[in-house]
Image (cartoon, helix red, strand yellow):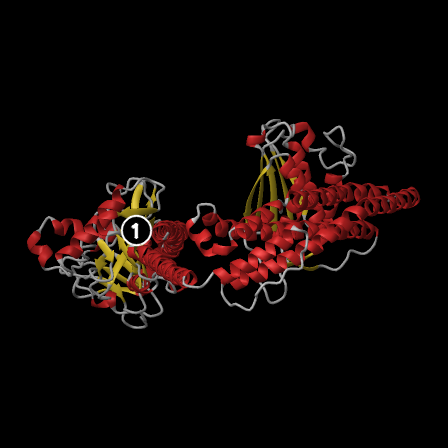
Amino acid sequence: MGVRIGVVIALTTFLSYLHILHTLRDEALVHLERYVTERSQREQTIFLLARDNHTFLKKALEERIQSLTQEEVGARFDRMFAHLPDGSVRNRAEGFDGTKMPGVFVPRRVTPDADMRRRILAAYDVLSWYGPAFHTRFANTYITLPEGPLVIYWPEYPTWTQEAEPDFWNPDFDFFSISLPKNNPARKTAWSQIILDPVARSAMVSVSTPLDMEGHHVATLSHDVSLEEMEARTFSDVLPAAYNVIFRDDGQLIAHPSMAEQGPAGIYNVLETAKQPDEASARPGSAEQRTHIRDIIERVKKHPPGDTVLELPEHGEYLATARLEGPGWNFVTVLPEATVTQPALQAARIVLLLGLGSLLLELIILYWVLQQQITRPLHSFTRATDRVASGDFHVELDTSRGDELGQLAHAFRLMADQVQRREEELRQANEGLEQRVEERTRELKELHTQLVQTARRAGMAEIATNVLHNVGNVLTSVYTSAQLAKERMEEMRLEHVGRVATLLRENQEDLTGFVTRDERGQHVLPFLGKLGRNLLDEQREIVSLLEDVGRYTEHVGDIVKVQQNYARTPRLHEPVQLADLVEDALRINSAGLSRHQVKVVRHLAALPPLLTDKHKTLMILVNLVSNAKYALDGVSPAERMLSLRMERTDTGHVRIQVHDNGMGIAPEMLTRIFQYGFTTRDEGHGFGLHSSALAAQELGGSLTVHSNGPGHGATFTLEIPYAPVQGKT
C-alpha cells in the first residue's frame, strides 16, 4: 500500500509541475508581450513626433521662401549677417544671442547668391518662430542647404556657429546625405545612424526631411535626438529578472546593460565586430556575452512577421520583440526561462514533501491501529448486530475509546439511533406527503384562481402562469426526492447483519481463532467495516434527500413570493454565492437529469459573494436547466451533455451559460423564444423562458440565446450586474 501511495504521490508531483509550469509560462509570456508592446509604443513617440514636426516645418519653410521678396532679403541679410575675415558668413556679433535666436554659418568656400540668401533668411525666420517650441523635446533644430550653409537653433551651445571652423562642411555628414535624392528617392523623413556628437559628447540620432521645390533639393530639415534618456529607461524600467536590448538590423547595438559602450568608431556593431576578432577582443564583455547578443540579433532578424514572443533555446531564454516605428530599431526584452521553471519546481517540491509526510503519517497510524486489541470491541459489535438484526436499535457500545474502534462504536450507535429516527420520520413523511402535496396543490390552485382574477382586473395574468410553471418544477423534485428516500430505506439490507451475528455466535468460544484463521471469519472485520461505511452512506443519502424535500418545499413559497413581488417594489438584494445557486438548480432538477441520463459538466469560476435577488436568480437557473434537460430527449443517452459555465466579464457583470448538445433552435425561432406563450414542446406552456427573461431584466441584466440551428444544441446566457458585498472583491 505504501508503494502504491508513493507512486501516486510521484505522479501527482509530476503532473502538478507540468500544470504549474504551463500556467506560469503562459502568464509570463502574455505579460512579456504586453510589456514590450507598451514600451515600444512609448519609445517610438519621440521619433513620430519628429516626423510630424518636419511635416509642419517643411510647409512653413516653403511658404516663407516663396513670400520673401528680393528687396527684403537684400536689406535684412546684410544687416543680420557679416562676411568675416576668415571667408565665412556668420551672425553679426553685436546683438547676437544664440540662446534665443538661430545661428547661421556659411563655409568659406561658398558665396551666397540671391536665391541662397533668400533660403538662408527664410530658414532663419522659421527657426526663430518654431525652434523654441521644438526645443522642449529635441536637443536642437537646424536646416542645411545643399550648397553647405547651416542654420541651427541650439540654446545649450549658443556659440556653435561662431566657433565652427571656416571649412566645416555639413554635406559630408550622414544626417544630410540621407536626404539626397540618390539616397532618399521617396523624399520622406529618414533617420541617420547613431553618431557621437563632437559638441554634445553624447550618442545621438538625426532625423532629417528633404525639401524639394520645383524638382530641386533646396534644403534639409533636421532634429538631433539624444539617446541618453532612452538608454536610462532601457536599463532601469525592466521586468523582474529580465533586461532590455535595442539594436539595428545591421547589428549596431543601441542599448545593452553590459555591452553598449562607445568606441572610437561609434556605437558597437555586434555583427561587423564578429568578423574582426582583433577588434572584438577590445570591445566590452566576454566572448560568451558577444556570442549571446549576436544570437539574439540573428534570432530576431529571422522571426516570422507577426510573432512577438520568440524562444532562444540555446540560451534558455524568451525574447519579446517590437519594431520602433521611424528608425526601424528592434526593441527586445530578454526573459530567462529559469524565472518560469524555478517557481514551478519549488511548488512541485512542496507537493512532494507534503505527500511524503502524509505517507509517513498514514503508515504510523496504521501500525498503531494494528497493535490495539480488537477482541472486546468485536464482542460488543456482535451483540449490537444481534439487536439491530432483531429490530432493537437501542444498542450499548463502548464509545470511551479514543481510537478508530471507539469512533466506529460511536458511529454505529449513532447510526442505529439515526436509522430508527429516520425510519419513523420517513414513515410519517410518506404518510403525510400525499396530504401535504394535495394541500399545497389546493393552495396553489386557490392562489392561481386569485391571480387570474386579479390579472383580469389589473393585467397580471402573467404572474399566475409563472407561479404554476416554477412551482411545478419544484414539486416534481419534492416528489422525486421522497421516492428516492423511500427506495433507499427499502434497499437497506440489514438481514446481512443478522447473518454475521449468527456466524459470530456460532464461533464465540474461539472468536479470536475464528477471526484470524477461519476463511469465513477473516471476512468478518472487512464486512463490518464496509457495513459501517455503507450504513453511514445510506444515512447521509437519506438525510440529504429529506433536506432536499424541506428545501424544495420552502422554495415553493419563495417562488410564490417572488412572483407576487413583480407588481410591487423589488425586494432588497442579499449576499449570494452564485456557485451555490447553480448547484441548487442542478439539485432541483437532479431527478430528471438522472432519469434522462444527462452528464453535467461544470466550469464555475470562484467568485466572491455578490448582492442580488437569490430567488429570482434561482428561478431563472431552474428553468434553464429544466429546458436543457428536455432538449436532450432526442439525443442518444450516452451523448447527452449539459454544460454550465460561470465567469466574470470585463463589463462589470457575471455571466452564467447553460449549454446543451440537444435538438437546437431554428433561426426563425430565436427571435420568438422569449415571447409569452411560445413553446416547442407539446406539453409546454411557454411561461418559463418568458418569465425568466423578465426576471433577468428586473435584476438589471439580460437573458439571451444562441444556436447554430437544429441538431447543434443551444446556449442560454444569463448576465447580471456584479455588485460585490462591501469589504469583498
Q: Quadrant of residue 199?
A: bottom left
- The C terminus lies in quadrant: bottom right
Q: Nearer the viewer, residue 388 or 369?
A: 388
Relative to 210, 561 lies left or right: right
Q: Is residue 519 visible?
A: yes
Q: Quadrant of residue 455?
A: top right
Q: Residue furthest front?
A: 509
> At 51% across and 68% down in the image, what residue appears?
402
Q: Quadrant of residue 625?
A: top right
Residue 390: percent from left, percent from top: 66, 51
Q: Residue furthest bottom?
A: 94
Q: Is residue 609 visible?
A: no
Relative to 504, 620 lies left or right: right
Q: Residue furthest left?
A: 278
Relative to 5, 158 lies left or right: left
Badge 1 marks a residue whose secondary structure is strand
Residue tagged 1: 318
Residue 283: percent from left, percent from top: 13, 59
Label count reads 1
Mark 1 is on which residue type? Tyr
Residue 415: percent from left, percent from top: 62, 56
Q: Nearer the viewer, residue 393 or 132?
A: 393
Q: Is residue 639 above or below residue 186?
A: above
